Structure formats: structure tokens, C-alpha cells
Image (tube, helix red, strand yellow):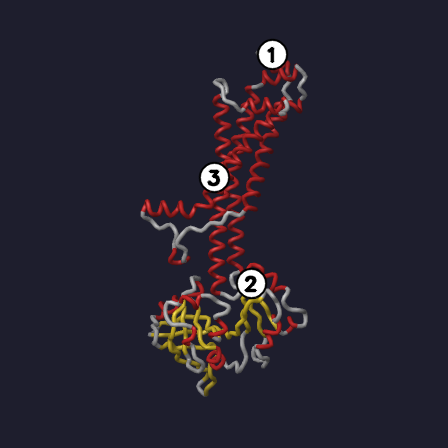
Amino acid sequence: MASLETWIGLRYLRAKKRNGFMSFITLISIFGIALGVTALIVVLSVMNGFQKEIRGQMLSASPHTEIGYKDPTGGEPWQDLRKVVAGKPEVLADAPYVEEQALLANAGDVRGVKLRGIDPAEEKKVVDYWQDMPSGSFDALQADGFDIILGAGVADALGAVIGGKVTVITPEGNVTPAGVVPRLKQFRVVGIVKTGVFKTDNTLALTHIQDAQTLFRLGEGVTGIRLKLAHPQEAPTFTRNLLNKEQSETIWARDWTFEDQTYFQAVELEKRMMTIILMLIIAVAVFNLVASLVMAVTEKQADIAILRTIGLAPNGVMKIFMVQGAVAGFFGTLLGVIVGVVVGINVGNIVAFFENLLGVNLVGSQVLFIDQLPSEVNVSDVLIIAAISLFLSFIATLYPSWRASKIQPAEALRYE
């Protein structure tokens, strides 16, 4: 059964003709808190969705972990690298590769690329984009054929077509009596890949691993092997614990976050800053709650004085207004969580509806290859947002409640 203070606090939340404006301000505070909580949940859900979608695209086009010899010309066979990961249940597949920077030229256009030498049969085990290539296939890469597969962006920039030739210019030149001359080699275009990752499609070129070894004068050496893991999200932890002290002296290891580390750091920073900014909406609503409680204390001075004269302690008076503010904060938070979760889950469909209604495209699929606004409602985010909202609402009740407890009955009743 509710205590007297709780009953009175809940009773004060009801609107009457005398205090209708005060109750209206309280209602505005509740909807303000709900709006802030909803906005925060929806925005973080969309950011989580974008991060998950882009991360998924990256993982479909990139190895989860890479390991290699610090000196690729040392003569160690790449099969020895397989022994490092042999028997580890986390590793589903591995594939050797050679990778160097190079320039591609065609019809007067030049493009910088990452030229990667692969074993087609092995590479299929660690990446997925070979299954849906716009033109050609991995199997078209033949040893000593000097064939090349281009990323879609690279092919467009160079105007390259299947069956055409592109010139590969390596950074290491040939020493001649006239000086150092860049090494040039013509490759035949046998395929085009589209990974869905903008950066990869605009910098990737694939050739057979033996042709890459010949081009870069590595002999039988390789850059390393690429690993596909059962749990890609755990790749950083797996990579840190992969090598022992002795192995780390000659072998390097890095996970899929290595090249895009700054991107993920930027996303996390953006999420923190967006959280802080949107928390201001909740803070404004909480200030409205403070104002409504201060007005309630002012209006109820006579009631407070009567309660004090019949024996209600100051902390009991304080509890009345704390209950009033806490209940308003609770319902505002509850409403915001319900609406935020519902909208967060369905935000893609909601945006698609308005796109069809207005005839505009709000999601740039040309760059992100995303046709619908992604979202992922994270339970931990929702709980943290709700906890912060409830905490701020509770803090908002302290000053008005303390002020009510300090009212002297004689002063309050003097002019009644």
C-alpha cells in the first residue's frame, strides 16, 4: 500500500482548474523527456546500423587477419606460416598473397592501386566477392599469363574493358646506363570485381601470385597469408594472442581493423559527441520539470503548511515532490524508450515510405551500396539512455523538494 507522501505526490499530478497550467508544464516536461530519449535511441540505432553494414561490407572484401614474414625475401616458404595457425579452431581458411603498390596506365590515364597477387583457388576460401563478379572470374587468372582483374572503380577510371591491355608500372625500376628506368609490364584484363566497398573498388587490382612474384622479384617469397575467422568481431583479440615472443621477432600479424582504424575511431567519437548533443534535449526537458515542480511548491504552500502542522516531517514534504517529479520522469523515459525502440527498429521502412511519398533519395546508395537506411537497436544503449534520463529526472527533483521542506507553516499561512 502506498505511503501518504506517495499518494499525495501522485494526487498532485492530476490537473484541476486551479493548477491546470502547472499540469500542462508537467505534461510538456514528460513529452520533452520522451522526445529526447526517442531521438537518442533512434540516432544511435541508425549509427549502429551504418557501422554494422559498412563493417559487414569490409569483412566480405577483406581478410579478417593477415600474418607474414617481416622479410619477405628471406626464403621461408609461405606454407610455414600455415603451421602458425594450424589446429586453431578460430581459423576457417587461409590463402597466400603478394601485395605491393603500383601504377596502372591506359590511354593516357594513370591510377594508383594495390596490386595483389593471389592463388585463385585459395583466395576463394577467404573472400566472398568472387561469387558475384560483374565480368570474368578468379579462374581466368593463369600463372605466367600476366592477366589482371580490376576493381570496378579502377576499370571505370582507366576506361579498361575485358580483353584490353593495361600497363603496370612498379615502384622499383631497372638500373640502366641512362639511370633508373621504371619497370613496365602489360597485363590483359580478364575480369572486373565489385566488392561494395568504395575504397577497395577504387584501389584493387588482382593478378596470379606467380606473376606478382615475378613482377616484384620476390622469387618464391610472399607478403603473407590471409585468414578467414569464424568470429570476425574477435579478430583483434585473436591477432594479439596469435604469436608468441619468439615468432613475433620474424612474423607480423594484423587484423581487419588495421587499415581502417581511424575510421572506426572517428565513428566512436562521433557517437559520443552525438550522444552528448542529444542529451541536451533531455536536459532541457528536465529543466522544464524543475520549473513545474517549483511552481507546484509555490502553489501548494498552504497545503504544505497544513501538512506540517498536523505532524508531517520536512523529509515527508520533500518526498511528496520527489515522487511527483520522479513519476513524471519515469513516464517520460518509458514513453521515449517505447517509441524510440519501435521507430529505431522500423526506421528503414519509415524513411523508404517518405522517399516514395516525396520522390527523393535520402540514402546515397551509389557510394555506400546501401538501398535502405540500416538500423540496429542495441539493448545496452537503450538501458544506458534510460538510466541517464531517470537519473537526471531524479536530480531535477532535489532542489524543488528541498525548498518545499524548508517552508515554515506560520509564514505560509499568514496571508491565507
How many numbered badges does the structure rendering display?
Answer: 3
- Specify few, some or many for label 2: CA neighbours under 10 Å numbering under 14, 14-19, or 20 or more: some
Q: Label 2 sits on what residue type?
A: Ala
Disc 2 secondary structure class: loop
Q: Between marks 1 and 2, how big is the CA–CA gap?
A: 77 Å
Callout 1 amino acid = Arg
Residue 203 left/right relative to 243: left
Which residue is the site of mark 2? Answer: 230
Q: Position of residue 44 (x, y in %)?
A: 50, 47
Q: Are marks 1 and 3 in contact (CB under 8 Å)?
A: no
Mark 1 vs mark 3, CA separation in Å: 48 Å
1 or 2: tag closer to the N-terminus: 2
Residue behind mark 3:
339
Position of residue 141 measured from the top left corner of the image (x, y, whole percent): 42, 77
Asked if residue 52 is positioned above or below residue 141 in the image, the reply reads above
Q: Is residue 39 left or right of residue 315?
A: left
Mark 2 → mark 3, Cα distance in angstroms: 36 Å
Near-viewer residue (208 or 86): 86
- Residue 15: x, y in percent? 50, 22
Residue at position x 64%, y 13% in the image: 410
State the residue at coordinates (50%, 31%).
29
From the viewer's perspective, is residue 37 above or below residue 76? above
Tell us which disc is closer to us: 1 or 2. 2
Residue 67 visible in image: yes
Which of the two residues, 172 or 332, is positioned nearer the viewer here?
332
Which quadrant of the rendered structure holds the N terminus? top right
Q: Residue 178 appears in which quarter of the rendering?
A: bottom left
Give the foreground label among 1 and 3. Answer: 3
What residue type is disc 3 on? Val
Labels 1 & 2 near each other (Cβ < 8 A): no
Vertical side of 73 occupied by 399: above or below: above
- Residue identified by numbered label 1: 414
